[in-house]
Amino acid sequence: MENEVGQSTSARPKLQIIIASTRPGRVGLPVGQWVRDRAVEHGAFDVEVVDLAVLNLPFMDEPNHPRLRQYIHQHTKDWSAKVDGADAFIFVTPEYNHGMNAPLKNAIDYLNVEWHYKPVGIVSYGGVSGGTRAAQMIKEVIAVLKLVALSEAVNIPFVQQFMSDEEQFEPNEVTQKAMTLVLDELVRWEAALRPLRTPIPKAEGVKA
């Protein structure tokens, strides 16, 4: 169940893992599946995976500013409800031309208040940079939406070296430890930010 601001009212907060890549044959899917498995094993969250390739949001087609929440399309209303119900996020992102990919930017831009006061861990991958330039761009974008990006992160350089013949992601010990640290920090930040997601009671005599 969720309260009026979309925060989970179950015993555990909800962690939403967003797989950003939509490219056929993408590495992001097995990386995202590994993140999901680690998050479930960690045990602090109810875990949901959102695959942007499956979600298939069209490029922004809403006439009103997202902060108004006056959505006219069902796909936007569905996306709003999904993000509203999450308490924390992990973005699993590639790096395209030193930045984030377009589907992730589009998914972020669709909404506004649904993102507020929630922590974000970033799992990035790529070549020599490990997707760190995409991660830096994401941090700049989400700050204005009152999302809190963790300083802890998982950066995976030369990601193909960790792919098995069965197209499974098999990380090394450094990556495993980094993922645990991100999950631990998400627990702390989710709890710390939770009061900010609670509506402030209106003073007597103040109209709604």
Image (spheres, rainbow, N blue to C red):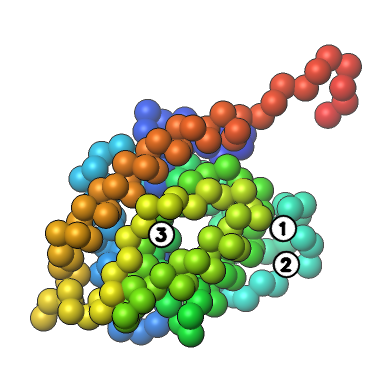
Q: Residue at x 64, y 53 (%)?
A: 145
Of all residues, the one furthest to the top in this rendering is 204
Residue type pointed to by label 2? Glu
Residue type pointed to by label 3? Ile
Q: CA distance from mark 1 to mark 3?
A: 24 Å
Q: Is residue 98 above or below residue 78?
A: below
Q: Is residue 103 above or below residue 116?
A: below
Occupied quadrant, residue 74: bottom right
Q: Mark 1 or 3 closer to N-term?
A: 1
Mark on residue 66?
1
The foreground one among 157 and 33 is: 157
Q: Secondary structure at mark 2?
A: loop
Residue type pointed to by label 1? Pro
Q: Nearer the viewer, mark 3 or mark 2?
A: 3
Q: Which residue is mark 2?
A: 62
Mark on residue 125?
none
Question: Can residue 102 be seen from the camera position used here?
Answer: yes
The foreground one among 175 and 169 is: 175
Q: Nearer the viewer, mark 1 or mark 3?
A: 3
Q: Secondary structure at mark 3?
A: strand
Q: Are marks 3 and 2 in contact (CB under 8 Å)?
A: no
Q: Mark 3 or 2 closer to N-term?
A: 2
Q: Left or right of 171: which side holds 54? A: right
Occupied quadrant, residue 207: top right
Q: Are marks 2 and 1 in contact (CB under 8 Å)?
A: yes
Q: Residue at x 78, y 67 (%)?
A: 63
The foreground one among 159 and 106 is: 159
Mark on residue 122?
3
Q: Are marks 1 and 3 in contact (CB under 8 Å)?
A: no
The foreground one among 111 and 155 is: 155
